[in-house]
Amino acid sequence: MNIQKMMKEAQKLQAKLQEDMAKAQEALADEQIEGSSGGGLVVVTVNGHKQVISVKIKPEAVDPEDVETLEDLVFAALQAALSAAEARAAEVMEEVQGGLGLPPGMDLGGMLG
């Protein structure tokens, strides 16, 4: 077996992985993922990097006498959005790995954030 040929193949694989990961990072940054609570009273939008883009609160969710409920709704919507973003990042990682012929579930060191 030719070691130089194997090294060249490994370098090609590494370059493809870096390119695919960069594309995946860009795609995740552009995605907008929503999480909501209270039947849509509070909607939080995050990107694929789990950065909050917006928080929308319907007026009927605001009760000055019950701030705790609003806090709970915001928290729940944020958690839902972050969980959805995490799931989407995992999907993208699987797509990248699948393109490289890597086994499912192989961790590439959290390269997608």
Image (cartoon, rainbow, N blue to C red):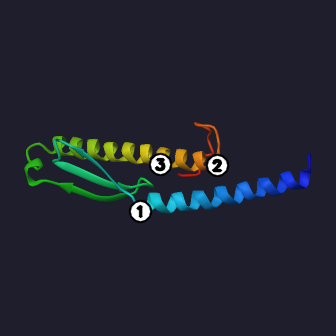
Residue 77 - label? none
Within the image, what quadrant is residue 15 found in? bottom right
Nearest to N terminus: mark 2 or mark 3: 3
Horizontal side of 16 relative to 3 (left or right) equals left
Calculate the distance from the C-alpha at mark 1 to the C-alpha at mark 2: 23 Å
* Three-letter amino acid code of the residue under disc 2: Leu
Residue that protrudes farthest toward the front in the picture: 1
Residue 89 - label? 3
Whole-percent x, y for residue 72 in the image: 23, 41
Whole-percent x, y for residue 63 in the image: 8, 47
Horizontal side of 14 relative to 68 (left or right) equals right
Residue at image position (62%, 61%) is 19
Label 3 neighbourhood size at 10 Å, few (<14), some (14-19), many (20+)? Answer: many
Nearest to N terminus: mark 3 or mark 1: 1
Q: Between 70 and 22, which is closer to the camera in this rendering?
A: 22
Disc 1 target residue: 30
Label 2 neighbourhood size at 10 Å, few (<14), some (14-19), many (20+)? Answer: some
Horizontal side of 59 relative to 24 (left or right) equals left
Calculate the distance from the C-alpha at mark 2 to the C-alpha at mark 3: 17 Å
Calculate the distance from the C-alpha at mark 3 to the C-alpha at mark 1: 12 Å
Whole-percent x, y for residue 90 in the image: 49, 44
* Three-letter amino acid code of the residue under disc 1: Asp
For residue 110, say whether it is visible: no
Q: Between 72 and 2, which is closer to the camera in this rendering?
A: 2
Label 1 neighbourhood size at 10 Å, few (<14), some (14-19), many (20+)? Answer: few
Residue 100 - label? 2
Residue at image position (92%, 50%) is 2
In the depicted structure, whether residue 80 falls above or below residue 4: above
Q: Are marks 2 and 3 in contact (CB under 8 Å)?
A: no
For residue 36, say whether it is visible: yes
Q: What element carries label 3?
A: helix
